Amino acid sequence: MTMLDDRTTAAAWPTAYPQGYAVVDVETTGLARDDRIVSAAVYRLDAQGNVEDHWYTLVNPERDPGPVWIHGLTSDLLEGAPLFPEIAAEFSARLDGRVLVAHNALFDWSMIAREYARAERTAPVRQRLCTIALAKELSLPLPNHKLESLAAHYGVVQQRAHNALDDARVLAEAFRPSLHTAAERNVRLPLLECRPLTEWVSTPAPAARIGHQVSYHANGWRPSRKRPPCPYPNPGRYEADKPLKQGMRVAFSGDTSIDRELLEDRTVEAGLHVATSVSRLTSLLVTNDPDAATSKTVKAKSFATPIVDEAAFTQLLRDVAPADG
């Protein structure tokens, strides 16, 4: 891969590119609308992607920390951490005037915007850049869209996956060569507008029934959109005790605790196909209520399509096997 020489970067740099970036990673209590940030990290970069400084903080979520087995942050560790309103000013100073960069930037931006809205403040972010979208724009030969794959492509070593500071460091190191490649090719960066939330109404979670996960998706604010076709062939049905494989057709039915579109985003990013209906070609149906007489569950049972609940599916998403070469 050819890179711009650092001595000529300033002269050759596209004038339309941003003047600075804030590479961000947040760890959270979960993925739903009412989940909270438990840690945040920001690497500030200059116009050419060089690191200026970095910052990290724990955040007391004022609730159960959620998937401790993922982020490693227990209630004891978070008990003495500052509340989000107490770190909002410093966070703002790190973001101000910069493009927010994150891996699956919609998720990080959504969590940050909600925290600011709860604190009756507005995040000083006007644009975001998703490194997944940039990798696609550059046609990088990645097996999937996981951060570890992007890092491996550029030889960046991950030390503590799902640690906000290390994930932000890894992303900053992988973003710089991506940015230089884009500049060399004069590629238009996939910048999207950030629309801050201006108000927040807390909605207490309804009591969960055994075997049922509550849903917040009705309060979502994302527009629906048509998704691109899955680039991988359908390898067939999911088999219990085996990993999902890229190209599998996954359908969803009923309420989910994770915002539905966010869950579908993660499904697509893993290389799976989101199916809007169930047919004989469907690899898997995800539902928290398999006994509901919905058209999808009825069809899935008639076709003997495998059915798993949301919790099992999100675990499977963490290790999706690559498509057959």
Image (tube, rainbow, N blue to C red):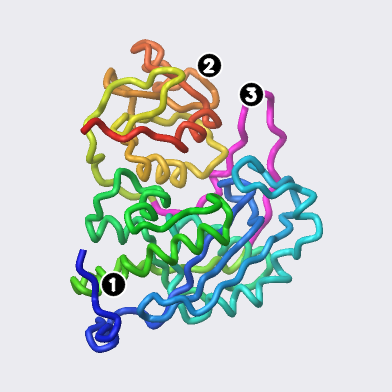
Residue 295 locus on image (x, y percent): 40, 21
What residue is pinned by disc 3?
Answer: 211
Q: Which residues are magenta?
A: 200-223
Residue 221 locus on image (x, y percent): 49, 54
What residue is pinned by disc 2?
Answer: 291
Residue 20 locus on image (x, y percent): 42, 80
Quadrant that contains the C terminus: top left
Whether residue 210 appears in magenta in the rendering, the answer is yes
Separation of marks 2 and 3 at Cα, in angstroms: 11 Å
Mark earlier in primary sequence (2, 1): 1
Residue occupying the point 71% across, 55% down: 61
Tell me which corner region of the image, top left, top right, bottom left or bottom right, holds residue 244.
top left
Label 1 sits on a secondary structure element that is helix
Amino acid found under the numbered disc labelled 1: His
Q: Is residue 31 above or below residue 2?
A: above
Mark earlier in primary sequence (2, 3): 3
Q: Is residue 250 left or right of residue 220?
A: left
Amino acid found under the numbered disc labelled 3: Gly
Q: Is residue 314 above or below residue 122?
A: above
Quadrant that contains the N terminus: bottom left
Mark nearer the viewer, 1 or 3: 1
Residue 180's mark? 1
